[in-house]
Amino acid sequence: MDLFGNEEEEVKDASKVPLAFRMRPKTLADFAGQQEAVGDRGYLKKMLESGRIPSIIFWGPPGTGKTTLAMIVAQHIKAEFIPMSAVSSGIKEVKAVVDRAKFNLRAGKKTILFVDEIHRFNKSQQDAFLPHVENGTIILIGATTENPSFEVNSALLSRARVITLKALEFDDLKKIVLRAITDAENGLGRRRIKITDDALKLIETISNGDARSALNILEVVDALKKEDEYGISVEDVRQAADTKTFLYDKAGEEHYNLISALHKSMRDSDPDAALYWAVRMMESGEDPLYVIRRVIRFASEDVGNADPMALIIANAAKDTYHFLGSPEGELAIAQAVIYIACAPKSNAAYAAYGGAVEDVKNSKDDPVPLGIRNAPTKLMKELGYGKGYKYAHDYEDNIVEQQHLPDRIKDRKYYFPSGNGQEENIKERLAEWRKKLSSR
């Protein structure tokens, strides 16, 4: 059950082991990417240096090093590493692991239980870990691609440290690929291989920040080559990668062309075109959750308060897809796209936000006006906190004239509602309020 021992010893022919497994780093020094976690100031590195390892949940996209980091932790503290898949394991298997961990503990050895896809365990299965995590029988390391705030029990989550991993950047994947083609012991270095920068960039694009996927592509290319010395070109990568994925890749021109077409079709209130582009993206292999994320952003940026229901419907589509999955969930996304394309448009909230951000970023942090500060203590009252504050509910129409912004920008206006949809009512209301205040 120890991946650092028995499993590797059973492999007679290393060439039969996938390249991604062979190239898995054994130490943090060999690990590429995730510097916020494993760098000199990273939390994980500090934990390993201290020798005090709590239970951990690694949260991030596929191929970002969740399993590898768990194995590195186990090796560093000389613990037995017991992997378990939440897909195929249940409470019976958990109990067996706990018995093994108790045996190890009596022998003075720690046990790390690594649960892949921990979000797939139900509440009772997750609860089975709790007492053994609390009393130190096992160190639990979970891996998940889903937000642990929603998918992991709060009781278990409170006893673990969540470490967020990100999709690997180009430089990280380049380092991984170059190491694989030069490593003669575990990689492909027994053959003399060169790779063009364009091919590296395409591997990064197609793999979507996934190291495992990048190495799988490299391994397919190597299998197709017969020479002891060869170069890897863009065409080689295209041939090795899945065609559908290549035609619609994360960073390619077609990706940005299609998302731009979706945005502009919704902005121009063309529901037919908007629906076509959304469906084409999803049918081409795009993650539907990516599509609905863009639609949610659009609902605030281009519809805003002209129709506040747009944001609600877009978020409901996200929740519906998350609940139903494919293929049923795509219909909710289509509904949201059509609704938002047909909604009145306004970018007033977007422009207001941008103006406020500009002021906040490019100026010092001015103090809050004294009149609108809370004054819970005698000293604060003596200093003038809350002095002269006007309670809106004591005034006609519940509106008052008093300073809310810092002195330097006390008259600044960010929000200028359009005359579209419900923003027409907002525009009229604000104008009426300002007229009444100026006449008082």
Image (cartoon, rainbow, N blue to C red):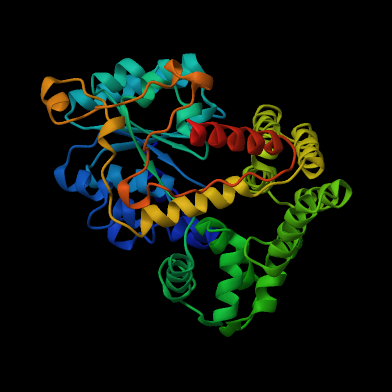
Q: Which residue is drawn at 55% across and 45% down?
A: 415
Q: In which quarter of the image is residue 323?
A: top right
Q: Residue furthest right?
A: 272
Horizontally, is 150 left or right of 50 in the view?
right
Q: How many marks?
A: 0
The one of 79 and 324 positioned closer to us in this rendering: 324
**x, y percent for residue 366:** 28, 48
**x, y percent for residue 268:** 80, 54
Residue 64 visible to the viewer = no
The one of 403 and 111 positioned closer to us in this rendering: 403
Residue 34 visible to the viewer = yes
Q: Is residue 303 above or below residue 325?
A: below
Q: Residue at x 25, y 35 (%)?
A: 370
The one of 409 and 104 positioned closer to us in this rendering: 409
**x, y percent for residue 248:** 72, 61
Q: Which residue is drawn at 37% across and 38% down?
A: 404
Q: Is residue 134 above or below residue 439?
A: above
Horizontally, is 309 left or right of 403 in the view?
right
**x, y percent for residue 390:** 36, 24
Horizontally, is 60 left or right of 286 in the view?
left
